[in-house]
Amino acid sequence: MQNTLFSSVFAILAFMASASATQASPPLISSSVKTGEVFKDKEGEESLTVVSSNELKDETGALLKYFVEGDKIRVVVQGRDAARNFYFFVTSEGLVEERGGKTLYSTAYFQAVSKIGSMSFVKGGCYMMGDNFGDGAASEKPVHRVCLNDFKIDKYEVSQAAFQMAMGNNPSKHYGCPNCPVDQATWEEAKEFCAKAGKRLPTEAEWEYAARNGGKKVKFANGRDKMARGDTNYQPGSVSAGGLFEMGLTALTASAKSRDSSTKAVGSYASSELGLYDMAGNVWEWTSDWHAGEYYKTSPANNPQGPPTSMSTVHRVIRGGSYTNFEYWMRASNRDSNSPGVRSAIIGFRCAQ
């Protein structure tokens, strides 16, 4: 019995130790684990279940002793001749083996990841893209007719849990919230993540069409004509582009600091008619397009893919605004951009297909 126990658990933990090169330990969330919590690898083949305050059970049913020691837990595997100790950090992802860095993910992490595969079907059609309300920037003009094929788009912004599981790291500044959107991912990393899932980044035209409930004339990216505090994660206030200069940077900064100043779990607010969450606020979202302020003057009508690099600012378009922005930036037609290599705590993404 002891030999079987040793062989089974040692094989699991040895695999965890050798699966990847030694990494710096991730930020520690807690050195305690909850009774009943289950930790599994990505494939769901290896697991450890917390039975009590000092016992774990592996996927074969074998029981193991564990002890909290400072910022780690020590798992004891009893062999035929001697016991062996394996050390784990307890993080927001789950149990991270100290020596090899392999992770057994928590139930909460798997639940966070399961949301991300959900997509909304968007029936194609034609719409008038750009500033239909007359209060936007010059880059949102002229309003022009765009026609799109059918497509799908993620219901949720990609979470930290999903990114960690697919990419093997979590670059987020707001680390430690598995259900929060991943941030500080570059445009290339966002593109790679989507490709691994058999998807792609949405075009700017697709993004706006989806944000407007299939191209309807609605003002804000959450598919509504009015914005209230409980509608999305943003800074309440009707400051316009011109109003920023009147308000002054000092007053603006003080106003922002007095309100929420972090991302929220994806899906925390009501969805749009298409079942999309957080299209306005939380984090800006990468699109596939290069950015050019004059692009709307020459944009093709059918399935536009953005300007050529020769016309662009060598920035990629971002849409939707973030938790740091006022109502003006929540508008469905609002455009902004950033360097594709930037790591920003207010930029995330969702995928399309």
Image (tube, rainbow, N blue to C red):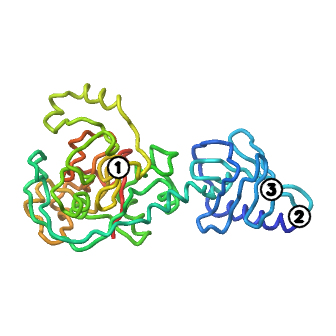
State the image coordinates of residue 233 (x, y, percent, origin top left): 35, 43
Q: Is residue 319 visible?
A: no
| Distance from Cα at disc 2 to Cα at disc 3 | 11 Å
Please name which of the two marks, 1 or 3, marks the residue nearer to the observer. Answer: 3
The location of residue 346, given as percent across then percent down, is 35, 45
Residue 21 lies, with reference to residue 171, above or below; the image says below
Q: Amino acid at mark 2?
A: Gln
Q: Residue at x 25, y 54 (%)?
A: 223
Amino acid type at mark 1? Ile
Q: Who comes first in sequence, dot 1 or dot 3?
A: 3
Between the C-alphas of marks 1 and 3, the distance is 42 Å
Mark 1 = which residue?
347
The kind of secondary structure element at disc 2 is helix
Q: Mark 1 touching mark 2, by CB under 8 A?
A: no
- Disc 1 is placed on an element classified as strand
Query: Image quarter for residue 62?
Result: bottom right
* Residue 347 visible: yes
Q: Residue at x 33, y 58 (%)?
A: 276
Foreground: 260 or 90? 260
Quarter of the image where the N terminus is located: bottom right
- Could you tell me how far apart the alpha carbons at marks 1 and 2 are, in whole angstroms? 51 Å
Could you say which disc has been placed on residue 23 in the image?
none
Q: Is residue 18 left or right of residue 56?
A: left
Mark 2 highlights which residue?
2
Image location of residue 109, percent across then percent down? 55, 55
Query: Please, is residue 149 above or below residue 92 in the view?
Result: below
Image position, residue 88 (x, y; %): 69, 50
Amino acid type assigned to the residue bearing label 3 in the image: Leu
Q: Earlier in the sequence, mark 2 or mark 3?
A: 2
Reading the image, the residue beneath label 3 is: 64
Label 3: state its secondary structure. Answer: strand
Q: Badges 2 and 3: C-beta atoms under 8 Å apart? A: no
